[in-house]
Image (spheres, rainbow, N blue to C red):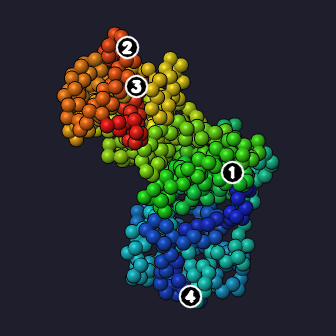
Amino acid sequence: MILKALYDYYNRCGDLPVYGMEEKQIGFLIVIDNGGRFIRFEDCRINKNTAKSFLVKKSVGRTSAPMANYLYDSSSYVFGYSDKTNGKEQLYFDTFKKKVESIALSFPGNKDLHALMGFYRHSREELLDQMMKDPLWNDISKSLSKKYSFFSFRIEGDTKIVAEKKELLQLEDNGLDDAKEMLCIIKGMRGPVVETTTATMIPGSQATAKLVAFQVNSGYDSYGKQKGGNAPISEEAEFKYTTALNRLLAKGSHNKFMLGNRTFVFWASSSSEASKDVEDGLFSLLGYDSNNVDNPNAKIEQVRKVFKSIYSGELKTDLNDRFYILGLAPNAARIAVVYWSDTSLKDFAGNIERHFSDMEIADTRKDKKSYMGLYEMLSAVTLGGKVSDATPNLPEAVAKSIFQGLPYPYTLFSSCLRRIKAEGGDVRIARAAIIKAYLNRLNDTNNKKISTMLDKDNQNQGYLCGRLFAVLDKIQEDANGIHSIRERYMNAASTTPASVFATILNLSSHHAENLSSDGRRVFYEKLKQEIMSKISADGFPAHLDLQDQGRFFVGYYHQRQDFFKGKTENNNE
């Protein structure tokens, strides 16, 4: 299913490299003259992590046996140098040299290949002696582990590298003439199949990591079949799905986002307007946009309208339109699939819209941004707001809840309560929204759903205790400009209300005497009585469970926000 979806994405795009080609980052070029004499290295790096991409022959799938790429490769092959000496440098060098010789024999008279043959008439030691004197050698030797650490050739005075010249690209076949024809598990048609698949590197993985990997003598050699024969993938299908995945994983891609060491890619099955809007919208919600560092929610309202219009049918979609999300993690020499979602485009839009609705809560700030994206949610429940410090697997669990409309993880809720208590009752908007969304998704029929705004009809005892505590806190703030009640008593009030409310009600009576006007004192007294009239006749609860502790903090937040609305009845002096 995953491979077929990636295969279809290749066909959908229309602008990916043709079969047998790929865009490869090549960090350095070896500039030579027409006689093959080394002149200098040329730096093709863009920054410390990326380099210029060239359209070259698709890289070979390597096993234990050395195989050279087509007129480009790593330093071990091109000039026999490695920063981790393993004694095979000469073998790799000879392998690449033979590759060049075989290509030159296929096209006698080509001046570029003639120059390369002149270059390889020198011994490995002679070439290294010249190269190590180049000013770029120090940079080259320090960057051999980088993704862009590949080398090719350019003839002095030419504008193109040898590996991308079309007249030479037509020479090489795929080297799979002897491949057996089998039924491809992706296309469902017979054709020559690959023995091993191409590397698709993700952050944190080895350079040779693959989405689909085969090994010998590891339990997969069933019925006498080895490597790719156990799960036949045709040459064309393998090329297309790996090319598509590399496009999704490319630097600057708007079809991916990171959660810890997990890499997530997403795409729609069609190229319709709605599909593209969903892809752009999801990146705005979850991706990192360097143009909106100061205001990551800048496009959120616009994005919400897109998802809402798709789910409501205002923006038309086809019933067959699908949306895919693939989560990958580094795992030794392979890539582990940690998440896979395949839903209809309309259902996915509905799940995102539901998340918007669940996370919506009262917001009295001038720049209202009540929607909380994934990173803001995780930041709200970690010490210092560091997303990297989130509980292991929490980011994935939250993402799964958003994408599939499932209950939010308990760890998110409990972490939120811990942070509020640890930070002296800091019930910021993101935390109140998380608690509201978590509790409402539990679908607990024994308790009323929590509303977006202050709900005076909500008679849950935890919610009422939170409202009352907010009133007492506001009285002290207006009277004395401090929050000692919140700092000293909030944690106890949210867990064992009966043990502290008598004390803080008594303190509040003294604070009220310092209010600036009789009208304000009357207002707060009426509000206290209105809330307390709904408290159980048995008195304040002796203990609140975790769910009601959450309702306590939402009640506190709602009541505080109501004070800031500036209603005339709240300022009756």
Q: Nearer the viewer, mark 1 or mark 3?
A: 3
Front one among 87 and 515:
515
Q: CA distance from mark 4 to mark 1?
A: 47 Å
**Residue 388 in the figure: left or right of residue 324:** left
Q: CA distance from mark 2 to mark 4?
A: 89 Å
Badge 2 amino acid: Ser
| Figure quadrant of the N terminus | top right
Does label 2 or label 3 sit earlier along the sequence? 3
Task: Give the residue number, with chain letter if any, for mark 4.
Answer: 156
Task: Give the residue number, with chain letter if any, for mark 2.
Answer: 536
Badge 1 amino acid: Ser
Badge 3 amino acid: Tyr
**Element type where label 4 sits in the image:** loop
Residue 160, image x and y in percent?
62, 81
Label 1 environment density (alpha carbons within 10 Å; few <14, some 14–19, many ≥20): many
Q: CA distance from mark 1 to mark 2?
A: 52 Å
Q: Nearer the viewer, mark 4 or mark 1?
A: 1
Task: Give the residue number, with chain letter if any, for mark 3.
Answer: 463
Residue shown at 41%/78% (left/top)? 136
